[in-house]
Amino acid sequence: MKICFNQATAMKNSTLALDLEWCEKTGYDFIEIRLDKLREYLQGHTVADLAAFFAASHLKPYSFNALEFISFRDEAGYKEITDGLKFCCETGAAIGCSKTVVVPTFDVGPYSKAEIKAETVRVLHELSDIAAPYGMRLAFEFVGYPNCSVNTLEQAYGIVAAADRDNVGIVLDCFHFHAMNSRWEALEAIDPAKLFIFHLDDSEDLPVGALRDDKRLWPGEGAVDLARIFGILKAKGYAEMTSIELFRPAYWDMPVPECIQVAYDKTKETIAKYV
Ligand code: ZN
């Protein structure tokens, strides 16, 4: 199981340059690059600088995070999504990054699940067509908030299955899976080939619908049944990667190298325990 760092974990006080340096020193295999951090980095560096870093490093890019709110957009909003995807495709081709996380829209109004599915599949098809010539794959991430239009694994997987494209899969995020009580049967039913990204995290013990990202905890310190999630993935033969992704303000306040090291150690301990 490869170990990946998601830049959300040290987000507030770090930069892409700093995360790259310390993830390489710490021994990570992969990094998920936040698009806001990438754009900030490109104000003082070039894409060629980034490509040169990865060419000379063990650390490799795993994905871009994230194109947010892809569905139910007006013309101007949707153009931001397609422009963002083209940027990911071109940058990804230059640095060897072949996945982009795509996130459904929040607060869309009282649409039925069938209507949400139809709209989201329609958009995923269009984005899939743009991404395919570049070899870019789209990892669809449901969010376990009550007001997200896609907020359980079963709903997200139904959409990805209906989209039925080789370059469209899901993100499984343990926090989001837990937060809206996604069904275990849904996790047991997924095709591991469709699991493009696995986000590792834990959570404070709040009621269904009350959790927000700032309540994430280091894996093993919270209420998420990581043993059961890892057990199901193991039984399916999933052994590709685990990406630590936290958004906890107290962790953001740690010195960046320490945050990156603790994240690595906690991820490694979790994998050693369950895989
Ligand atoms: Zn996630």
Image (cartoon, rainbow, N blue to C red):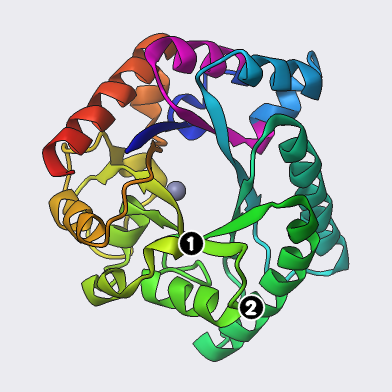
Say whether residue 254 is visible.
Answer: no
First along the sequence among labels 1 and 2 = 2
Q: Amino acid at mark 1?
A: Ile
Q: Main secondary structure of the magenta part?
A: helix
The image shows residue 1, relative to residue 206, as above or below, that is above
The image shows residue 132, relative to residue 10, as above or below, that is below
The image shows residue 141, relative to residue 186, as above or below, that is above
Q: Is residue 155 left or right of residue 104?
A: left
Question: Mark number for residue 28?
Answer: none
Q: Which residue is mark 1?
A: 170
- Please provide percent x and percent y for residue 181: 27, 68
Q: Which residue is mark 2?
A: 121
Q: Is residue 135 left or right of residue 196?
A: right
- Determine the secondary structure under disc 1: strand
Q: Write the residue at 60% across / 67% down.
A: 166
| Quadrant housing residue 90 | top right
Q: Write the residue at 32% across / 38% down.
A: 1
Q: Is residue 25 magenta?
A: yes
**Tag 1: Cα neighbours inside 10 Å, few (<14), some, or many (≥20)?**
many
**How many numbered circles does the render carry?**
2
Magenta segment range? 17-36
Q: Amino acid at mark 2?
A: Val
